[in-house]
Image: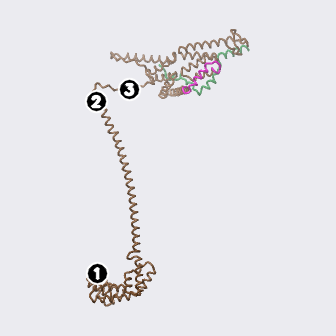
Amino acid sequence: MIDFEEEIKKFQPSLEVDDAEDAIYNNDVPDITDLISKIMEDMSK
Amino acid sequence: MRCYKCGGTLTEADRCPQCGADTALYKKAVMASNAYYNLGLAKARVRDLSGAAESLKTSIMINKNNTDARNLLGLVYCEMGEVVEALSEWVISKNLKPENNPASSYIAQIQSNQSRFDMVTGTVKKYNTALKYAKEGNLDMATIQLKKIVVQNPQLIKAHQLLALLYIKDKEYGRAKKLLNSVLKIDRNNTLAQLYLKEIDDELQLRKKQSSQSDFLPKKREKKVPDTKPLSGNDVIMPRSSYKEPSNGAITIINILAGVAIGAALIWFLVMPSRYKGITEEYNKSLQDYSEQLSSGNVELNSMTQELEKVRSEKEALEEKLSGLSGDSGSNKLLTAVIKAANLYIANDTVAAAEALIDLDVSSLPTDEAKKLYNTVAEATMKPAANEFYNKGTTEYGKADYSSAAENFVNAFKCDSTKAEAAYYAAKCYVALNQPENAKKYYQYIVEGFQSSSYYSEADAYVKSH
């Protein structure tokens, strides 16, 4: 049977307009290509 | 494809033709990102939105510059009701590739209908509030809020899921199923919705099994109930009407007559009193107007009466003044009498001059000159005239002409008030003429002014006896 308390914890707030700007500016996290570039640079050194 | 180091265009070779960097791994990574994008696109085409979102997120995690994946992820978010998330993805995509990017048109479309955008973002904010309520245990408030949200923004899958969870907690499985089915219409393979539906089905089957095990007696044949859709939070339940059509025409006629009677009663009890009230008020108002007019007329009449009285009194005063001037005792008359007496005195007619002055009141004369003239003539004529009248009276008394004698004696007494014998014989004449009042008058003069005279005792006896 569904455990309500556990299920409710899974729900997360949605992104609001006021928070959109921060979300866009904080989006610049490294991706796999960044990691590859970094590895390749380290190997070439 | 461009080199991750210098940005130059790559060829099929594993090295960059410009900078010579090893691009073999990089190319594989980009291809993996594209593969996930293709997977996400395939899932999105069959409305597996949550699956597509996962694939596209993976694609972006491998290559964050994959604008196609970002744009598609934005569309998937938009379809799931997450407009702000979608807008964020499109803004980042446009920032990465400003030219020839469909994200620009998506943003423009969102911005073209600002009111719709405000409404949708408002529902997102309300969803967060409802989630907060639910986590705090305020489930009724959360349910009310979520019901509004699913009406305003039917695409917001999260709201449907949360409301379905609340319904499941309250064991309202029908409503929860309807919400979850609507989620699956938007997102065909939504894992959470499918999980909840499975749990609901299991629960319902368990109940059915338990009820069938407990019913060992043969069941009463149940009526077939038409299949209805499960209720949602927005359905309105109408109470069953108790109204039945009348069976025949007589009841219809009775109903009509009853309606007419009720209508007439309503008019009689509600409309007529107000009408009567209006008429009465109008009558009272006109009556009040007339009363005011009457009272003002009375006031005017009173003032006019007072004015008339004033005019009359003024008229009487003037007439009195006029009579004072021109009447018997008027100033003019008095003056005329004094002048006449003076002329008679000048003409040596002493008796006539005194006779003219006898009945004059010296204090009534208007001027001092007239009074002075009166005194002069009176001093000169009164005494001799008194003797003359007395003598005449004596003669007439002797002839028993009491009337003429009384007149002469009275004139003699008027001319000389010290002449007691004149008063005495005047009284005697009046006694003879049987005029006791006049007789008493002259006897009274003797009693009051001539106590030492010989006539006193007789006069006193007459006054006392009469």
Q: Is residue A39 magenta?
A: no
In the rendered image of this protein, does residue B82 appear above or below residue B308?
above
Residue B450 visible? The answer is no
Question: Looking at the picture, which amino acid does disc 3 mark?
Answer: Pro
Badge 3 and badge 2 both on one subunit: yes
Image quadrant in which you'd find residue B217 = top left
- Rate crowding at label 2 as few (under 14), some (14 to 19) or many (20 or more) other CA atoms within 10 Å: few
In the rendered image of this protein, does residue B167 appear above or below residue B351?
above
Dominant secondary structure, magenta: helix
Q: Which chain carries label 1?
A: B
Q: Residue B437: give its label.
A: 1
Q: Is residue B155 left or right of residue B456?
A: right
Question: Looking at the picture, which amino acid does disc 2 mark?
Answer: Ile
Q: Chain B is drawn in which colour?
A: brown
Q: Colour of chain A?
A: green
Is mark 1 in CB contact (under 8 Å) with mark 3? no
Label 3 or label 2, whichever comes before in sequence order: 3
Q: Name the residue under label 2.
A: B254
Badge 1 and badge 3 both on one subunit: yes
Label 2 or label 1, whichever comes before in sequence order: 2
x and y, in percent, of residue B302 in the image: 38, 60
The residue segment tinted magenta is B93-116
Q: Residue at x 30, y 89 (%)?
A: B395
Q: Mark 3 lies on which chain?
A: B
Q: Residue B239: give its label.
A: 3
How far, Cα to Cα, is label 3 from label 2?
28 Å
Image quadrant in which the N terminus of chain B is located? top right
